[in-house]
Amino acid sequence: MDPGKDKEGVPQPSGPPARKKFVIPLDEDEVPPGVLRYHNLHPDYIHGRLQSLGKNFALRVLLVQVDVKDPQQALKELAKMCILADCTLILAWSPEEAGRYLETYKAYEQKPADLLMEKLEQDFASRVTECLTTVKSVNKTDSQTLLTTFGSLEQLIAASREDLALCPGLGPQKARRLFDVLHEPFLKVP
């Protein structure tokens, strides 16, 4: 039997992916590798590893290197396992990509969560723009046009579909979508 391969001749993952490229040192016992080809041959392996984790960690991540041509079925199985184990599934398509994920996680391991959180704009116009651009096809320019035309969010909400459609760059379809979103109830009434 060839070292580094299992009895079927499939290469075994050994140590963290792309080890040579890491800037941050990793403890090899900390990082069990997951390769999809190995999972296809030994479907209970990852399941057993996830069970052995238990609830010992607040953040449980399964990083899998996708190294097969047709991964759909295996990925479905892994996704289901991760949902049941309250684990995040991350897919890497090369050892280098897997290494970058590990390196990033390691770099942020002891950092406060607010470093990763989105920074919210504090001014009114930016926050309204962020809100309005969640409506399909409404962009930042449309948002600025709407705020300039109507002067306030209250007047924008009170505007009719026809008034919205008269705004330059909006048109009837965007106006209809925006009007519908602004007048939908927040909670569905049974």
Image: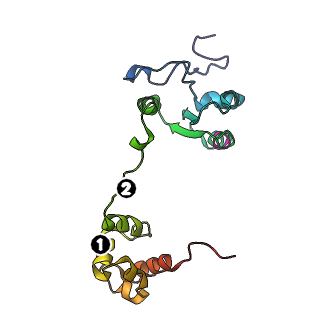
What kind of element bears circle 1? helix
Is 182 inside the magenta-drawn segment?
Answer: no
* 72 relative position to 115: left or right: right
Amino acid at the residue labelled 2: Leu
Three-letter amino acid code of the residue under disc 1? Gln
The label shown at residue 120 is: 2
Q: Could you tell me residue 187's position as x and y percent? A: 60, 72
Which badge, 2 or 1, comes first in the chain's sequence?
Answer: 2
Crowd around label 1: few <14 · some 14–19 · many ≥20 (10 Å): some
Name the foreground residue: 152 vs 25. 152
Disc assigned to residue 144 = 1
- Tell me the tag on residue 31: none
Give the main secondary structure of the magenta stretch: helix
- Residue drawn 69% across the image and 27% down it: 52
In this rendering, the answer to whether 7 lies above or below 161 is above
Magenta-highlighted residues: 76-80
Q: Is residue 165 above or below residue 105?
A: below
